[in-house]
Image (tube, rainbow, N blue to C red):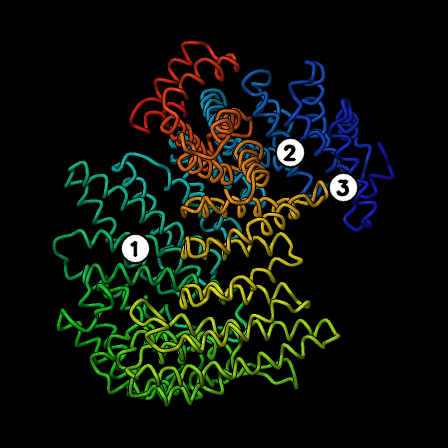
């Protein structure tokens, strides 16, 4: 072997050596006999370096996985012998191999097993067992091989194939795996189970590592072998013995969980679970308050959860089968576990609590189905409710300023608890409402002296009621009087108690979230709006010391104002004055740190727009307010654009361009307030936005930071096309001209949707403009598409693909808007060039999205020009190019009908052929029958069949025929 290249296998080697090692590995993979060198190195222990040993196994793995069938019988036998020799050496080596080598070796054994077991190596396990006997190192390898075999046969997390052939390969693999498991069950599973028992018995007191490994194997295999081999007295007694041995009990717990999880007859399952429970209970495992080992309790909680869910699954099946007596017995067994479930649910460790939530959820589902609840069941519901309320509470360690992994896990855990609360609401909505009301009122009465986490959870519970007790369109304060009164009382308490001043971010945020969630409350009691507005606007909200609170409040404030626009009229000017300083465009100078980020300011601008547009003021007053809002932006914009033109330093240029972009973005965002009922014209605001347009458009001719500036102005134009309608048209030609200068693929790709929007909205109104800019746009597109790119530059290839799609989308918009004259008036040579690009797009590029668009364009052009009075020469083009395209595209190897987009492309291809037949009639059939299809050597009966399908009046018939 190349010793120099092998040096690069060491993780500490420098990059050049590592690169050389990788290249060497690739070279060995394709070499005919390199695997033999590696096999010899392993069998004779030639190398002591761990990374080289691992490398040798990788080469062998590649040979078995991809090139095994190319080997002769003798060579295959050599691989088997190599592995057995290596295994024998493991028991004699002074030191065991590193874990990563043992795991890789186990994977290679497992690969050989799935390849050879059914044909050449039926004694695979017996051969391994005869080598390892009860030698601890041998047993370790044997157990690792068993786990690797299970991963190959069962564990679907192991992805074996590429995406394209995934499903096909999956089916073949699933059949193979089923056959392997069936054969193993017949030939060797009882012997393997016996070997596990011997290993457990031999090592349970003197080698906890091997015992745990063996328990893991039992747990893995129990899902697909005969359960009676494991669920019997000798095995279960041994496992239960392990439950009281500290180093074994976590693995024993998992093993018992897998046994309980095994699918079986509901009555047998109930018996199995009950007998396990009796033994566990008598062993004192149910009194968990004395237990301080949280890792074990988390596993134990998972086991109890498995037993509870298994019993519930049995109950469901028995009810379905009508066996009421057994169902009742099972229900009693379930009820008997509830006390234990509650102890685990309320446990201070969230992992332990989280592991039992499934049982708890399913138990509530049973109660929901019962016609009446017993007193004990009602008490259980209440106990679960109290547990959920307690467990929703943050603990002291939660870091609100710097949320890490622990905090993220608690957030996920809270989501699980929310599901429980929703389920509780389905079982007993009255009880939930009463419990939340009690906790809420008690806490809010003394919020000043209560710890933050208790105040937060009290408000959080009120917030959660909105989803737990659902109503349509947030109408919580009408309908059911009891519920409406309770919620109204709590909301009144929330906004009048002064709790919004609590000095903790979690309470502040929960206050604002809840106020916005129950915005309908303020329609019922509008007298509280000023109080809440002040909270939003002062140090509790938008001016809070925490950036996180300010940011979230900006969004919530926007939602609050939007939802209450009818009630906001008395406060509009006051609010606009108070938020004025928050809307300052902060230029990148003097290190000034604004209270809100530019993203947060977008919400404030939108809110200001909504306040003005939805007010009851006259159009004149609205115009004045909107001008007051936008003029500072325009003035700042002009100054900053001048500064940008003169800026030398690139960082400064970027900062200025960003600031200019924010100004345009803010102006765009104010326009979101307009609607069909309140248009820009009706509000008298057209002039202000036209002024904005005139202010912003010069940025398009700025040679610096083009991408950023163009992107912002383009977005503004999109908005103005919607808001100003035809008033925007005079600005489009010069804007387009600037945007087409020095543009790249991405610029064009983003410019085309703007032109499509104008075309689709104004249609013939913009026909002269489109005719004028059609070829300049196409030339810019073709220029970019023809630029040479490096072969492996995937991002450049993707950009070109996206641009091609945008180009075809543009042609589709033009033809689909009834403006084919835009293309027709470009002169014969240009028209032909455009048509050929569409044919090329339909046939040559393996991009089904573009192909579909091209066929839509072709069928539209045939519909418009394909009749007797169409442009001269177009009928010829139909027969020479469009008809062949309809056949050549589906015949391409890349045309994959397993792909949904390709099926749509084929459907449009069928529409194109139908349209040709519709426009050209019998002449089309004659051409297909006598000229085109015979030229493809298609059999006469197939030609006949094809033409009959094409002539069917129902287009679906032909589409389905084409698919087949």
Mark toward the viewer: 1 or 3:
1
Q: CA distance from mark 1 to mark 2?
A: 45 Å
Q: CA distance from mark 2 to mark 3?
A: 19 Å
Q: CA distance from mark 1 to mark 3?
A: 49 Å
Q: Circle 2 sits on which residue?
A: 138
Q: Identify the residue shown where x is 66% and y is 67%.
A: 705
User: Could you tell me which secondary element the residue under label 2 belongs to?
Assistant: helix
The image shows residue 298 at horizontal and vertical percentages of 44, 56
Q: Circle 3 sits on which residue?
A: 50
Task: Please report whichever mark, 1 or 3, sits nearer to the chain's N-terminal start.
Answer: 3
Q: Within 10 Å of the Cα at label 1, are there few (<14), some (14-19), or many (20+) other Cα atoms?
A: many
| Occupied quadrant, residue 457 | bottom left
Q: Identify the residue shown where x is 51% and y is 74%.
A: 399
- Residue 326 in view in this figure: yes
Q: Is residue 739 above or below residue 522?
A: above
The image shows residue 10 at horizontal and vertical percentages of 79, 46
Q: Relative to the observer, which residue lies in front, 745 or 276? A: 745
């Amino acid at each position: 072997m190349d010793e120099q290249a092998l040096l690069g296998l060491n993780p500490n080697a420098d990059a050049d050596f590592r690169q050389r090692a990788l290249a060497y590995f690739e070279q060995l993979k394709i070499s005919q006999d390199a695997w033999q060198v590696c096999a010899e190195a392993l069998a004779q222990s030639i190398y002591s370096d761990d990374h080289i040993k691992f490398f040798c196994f990788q080469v062998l793995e590649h040979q078995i996985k991809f090139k095994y069938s190319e080997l002769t019988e003798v060579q295959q036998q050599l691989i088997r012998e190599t592995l057995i020799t290596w295994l024998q050496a493991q028991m004699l080596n002074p030191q065991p191999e590193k874990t990563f080598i043992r795991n890789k070796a186990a994977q290679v054994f497992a690969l050989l097993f799935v390849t050879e077991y059914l044909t050449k190596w039926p004694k695979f396990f017996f051969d391994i067992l005869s080598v390892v006997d009860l030698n601890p190192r041998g047993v370790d390898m044997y157990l690792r091989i068993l786990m690797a075999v299970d991963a190959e046969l069962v564990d679907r997390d192991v992805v074996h194939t590429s995406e394209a052939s995934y499903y096909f390969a999956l089916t073949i693999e699933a059949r193979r795996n089923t056959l392997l498991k069936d054969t193993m069950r017949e030939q060797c599973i009882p012997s393997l189970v016996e070997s596990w028992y011997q290993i457990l018995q031999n090592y349970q007191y003197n080698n906890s590592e091997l015992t745990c490994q063996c328990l893991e194997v039992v747990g893995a295999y129990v899902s697909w072998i005969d359960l009676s081999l494991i669920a019997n007295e000798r095995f279960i007694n041994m496992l239960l013995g392990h439950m009281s041995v500290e180093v074994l009990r976590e693995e024993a717990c998992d093993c018992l969980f897998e046994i309980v999880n095994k699918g079986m007859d509901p009555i047998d399952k109930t018996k199995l679970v009950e007998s396990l429970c009796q033994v566990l209970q008598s062993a004192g495992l149910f009194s968990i308050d004395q237990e301080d080992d949280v890792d074990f309790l988390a596993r134990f909680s998972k086991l109890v959860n498995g037993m509870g869910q298994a019993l519930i699954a049995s109950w469901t099946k028995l009810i379905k089968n009508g066996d009421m007596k057994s169902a009742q017995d099972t229900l009693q067994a379930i009820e008997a576990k509830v006390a234990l479930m509650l102890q685990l649910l309320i446990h201070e460790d969230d992992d332990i609590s989280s592991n039992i939530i499934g049982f708890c959820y399913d138990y509530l589902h049973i109660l929901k189905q019962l016609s009446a609840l017993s007193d004990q069941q009602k008490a259980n519901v209440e106990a679960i409710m109290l547990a959920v309320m307690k467990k929703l509470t943050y603990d002291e360690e939660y870091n609100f300023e710097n949320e890490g992994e622990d905090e993220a896990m608690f957030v996920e855990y809270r989501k699980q608890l929310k599901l429980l609360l929703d389920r509780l609401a389905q079982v007993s909505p009255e009880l939930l409402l009463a419990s939340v009301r009690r906790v809420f009122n008690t806490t809010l009465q003394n919020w000043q002296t209560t710890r933050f986490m208790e105040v937060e959870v009290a408000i959080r519970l009120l917030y959660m009621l909105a989803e737990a007790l659902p109503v349509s369109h947030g109408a919580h304060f009408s309908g059911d009087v009891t519920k409406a009164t309770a919620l109204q009382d709590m909301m009144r308490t929330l906004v009048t108690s002064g709790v919004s001043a609590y000095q903790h971010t979690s309470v502040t945020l929960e206050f604002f979230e809840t106020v916005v969630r129950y915005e309908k409350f303020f329609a019922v009691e509008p007298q509280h709006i000023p109080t809440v507005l002040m909270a939003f606007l002062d140090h509790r909200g938008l001016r809070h010391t925490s950036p996180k609170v300010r940011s979230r409040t900006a969004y919530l404030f926007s939602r609050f104002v939007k939802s209450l626009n009818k009630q906001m009229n008395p406060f509009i000017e006051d609010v606009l004055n108070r938020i004025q300083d928050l809307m300052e465009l902060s230029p990148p100078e003097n290190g000034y740190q604004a209270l809100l980020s530019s993203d947060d300011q977008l919400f404030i601008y939108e809110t200001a727009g909504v306040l003005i547009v939805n007010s009851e003021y006259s159009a004149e007053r609205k115009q004045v307010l909107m001008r007051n809002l936008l003029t500072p932006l325009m003035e700042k914009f002009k100054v900053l654009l001048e500064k940008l033109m003169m800026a030398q330093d690139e960082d400064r240029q970027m900062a200025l361009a960003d600031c200019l972009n924010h100004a345009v973005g803010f102006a765009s965002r104010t326009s979101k307030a307009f609607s069909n009922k309140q248009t820009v014209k009706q509000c008298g605001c057209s002039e202000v936005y036209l002024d904005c347009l005139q202010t912003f458009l010069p940025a398009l001719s700025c040679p610096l930071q083009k991408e950023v500036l163009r992107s912002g102005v383009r977005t503004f134009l999109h908005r103005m096309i919607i808001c100003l309608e035809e008033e925007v048209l005079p600005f489009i030609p010069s804007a387009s001209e600037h945007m087409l200068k020095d543009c790249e693929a991405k610029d064009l790709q983003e410019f085309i949707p703007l032109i499509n929007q104008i075309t689709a909205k104004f249609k013939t109104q913009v026909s002269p403009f489109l005719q004028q800019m059609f070829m300049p746009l196409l030339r810019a597109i073709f220029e970019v598409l023809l630029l040479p790119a490096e072969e492996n530059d995937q991002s450049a290839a993707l950009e070109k693909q996206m641009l091609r799609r945008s180009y075809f989308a543009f042609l589709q918009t033009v033809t689909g808007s009834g403006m084919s004259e835009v293309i027709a008036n470009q002169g014969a040579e240009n028209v032909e060039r455009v048509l050929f690009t569409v044919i090329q797009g339909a046939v040559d590029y393996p991009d089904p999205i573009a192909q579909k668009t091209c066929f839509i364009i072709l069928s539209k052009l045939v519909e418009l020009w394909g009749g007797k009075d169409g442009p001269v020469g177009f009928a010829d083009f139909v027969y020479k190019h469009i008809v062949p395209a309809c056949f050549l595209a589906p015949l391409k190897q890349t045309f994959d009908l397993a792909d949904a987009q390709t099926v749509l492309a084929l459907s449009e291809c069928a529409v194109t052929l139908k349209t040709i037949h519709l426009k050209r009639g019998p002449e089309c059939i004659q051409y297909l029958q006598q000229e085109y299809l015979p030229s493809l050597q298609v059999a006469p009966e197939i030609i006949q069949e094809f033409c009959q399908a094409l002539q069917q009046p129902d287009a679906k018939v032909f589409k389905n025929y084409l698919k087949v």
